[in-house]
Amino acid sequence: MNRTIPLVLAVALFMEQMDSTVIATSLPAIATDIGTNPIALKLALTAYLVSLAIFIPISAWMADRFGAKRLFCTAIGVFVIGSIACATAGSLEAFVMARFLQGMGGSMMTPVARLLLVRATPRQNLVSAMAWLTIPGLLGPLVGPPVGGFFTTFLSWHWIFLINVPIGILGIAAAWLFLPELERGQPGRIDVKGFALSAAAASGIVFGLSVVSLPALPPVVGLATLLAGIAAGFAYVRHARRTVRPLLDLSLFSNRIFSAAIVGGTLFRIGAGATPFLLPLMFQLGFGMTPFESGMLTFSSAFGAIGMKFLATTALRRGGFRRVLMGAAVFGALSIGLAAVFTPQTPAWAIIATLIAGGFMRSLFFTSANALIFADIGDERAGQATAIASVFQQISIALGVALAGGILEGVTVATGSGLDVDAFAVAFVTVAIVTATAALPFLRLPPDAGASVSGHRIGGDNARSQVLPPK
């Protein structure tokens, strides 16, 4: 059961992660078919992200109210219905609404999957279970573009959504059969004001960053929405401090282990969000590769992500969370920075080796950081932890794409030239520096932080005895 639970959850998450990227390759074909243009159709990408941002904060309350297992199965069902609606959409408006519906299902799948995993897995097995759950999140964005290109070229763009139907049905059946029935929490009354403020904050920030980085609307609209989202975020912080049971309990940040995991993970995920955006552009626009050649190169990092699965538990047991996360952050940033020296003449094996190493480090970091989030958090607050972590995940990925797009735009304006290799070099170096700062939040942690999960021993003593019991 230790492997069955994360594998069942991972199948659904892989479907979601792949679907969120597969559409990018098929935008021109979809736009032509429904009578619009690819730039306008990028609103569909933004609609999905906004839907995630709105409904993720309420996922913890709904899991306690209706049961995590039932909610997870329902979320897959909503996602499948949204997929069918996307495949049958005949206009821009219908397609955008269908993507929003898909996002409603996706917003519950990831945080509820983490919640199920944490509550059903003993703490000493959490790292291994998280490794299985992390892999689909890394493979989905890599597999999505080639799959989307294949379906669109040889079949029809409709199949990138219809393929979710059999996968979703199998996912619901497997989840219902193999996932345990967990004890529900005590959700109480929903924090309506908190939900409104958190939805406005998260969706405003994500929408604003998405519009700025992928301008389907005038950039001023994105900037105004971003500022409104930030203002709503400050309003939510003030509301949460005055409310007995806020929707998102920000008091969790008083736990320095949880706080370090969230802040460090957010900084690192900025680089992880920028890299899949920059690499295909550089390979195709800077190096003159075909989409297929570019996809085969970027896919190589998946081998590093899979290889990490077999080493994460051992690495954390020997090095502990503090040392492993700092090392993974620094070396992960280095692998991103090395892309700045790639040229059209760089041997393919050197590029592949760098991408495999980068995939390994990213997977090691995310597996470790995701486990550390729950190292000092009791099961009764795990729902809050998953919701907060998922919100910051969406914001950080949007930040990564916005940062990468902004750097490229700034360099081209400053130099007066197009997107050449030098512009991508500046972008990769900048993103690498930001990624390296992810090591800083872990500097203040004690060497035995999270030892109840990692099993790390210090000086021959079992570090577990030095950790406070979960709160």
Image: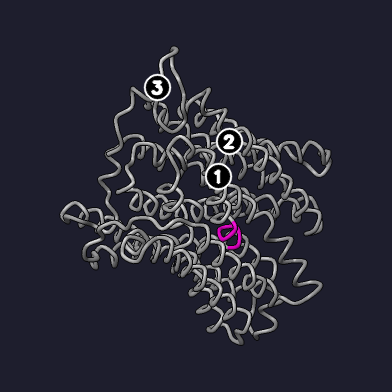
Which residue is label 1 attached to? 271
Which marked residue is nearer to the observer: mark 2 or mark 3? 3
Rendered location of residue 139, percent (x, y)? 64, 52
455 shown above or below 139: above
Residues at marks 1 and 2, CA–CA distance in whole angstroms = 8 Å
Query: Label 3 is placed on what type of residue?
Result: Ala
Sequence-earlier tag: 1 or 2: 1
Residue that badge 3 annotates = 463
Q: Which mark is residue 174?
A: none
Location of residue 32 in the rendering, given as x and y in whole percent from the top left corner: 70, 81
Prevailing secondary structure class for the magenta stretch in the rendered image: helix
Nearest to the eye among marks 1 and 3: give it: 3
Give the amino acid type for the residue marked by disc 2 in the picture.
Ala
Image x and y of residue 84, in percent: 59, 79
Q: Callout 2: helix, strand or loop?
A: helix
The one of 35 and 152 positioned closer to us in this rendering: 152
Count of residue discs: 3
Q: Is residue 411 left or right of residue 325?
A: right
Callout 1: few (<14), some (14-19), or many (20+) C-alpha neighbours within 10 Å? many
Where disc 1 sits, the SS reads helix
In the rendered structure, which segment of residues is drawn in magenta?
Answer: 11-15
Spot the residue most to the top. Answer: 459
Q: Which residue is mark 2?
A: 333
* Residue nearest the observer in this picture, 2 or 88: 2
| Of callouts 2 and 3, the N-terminal one | 2
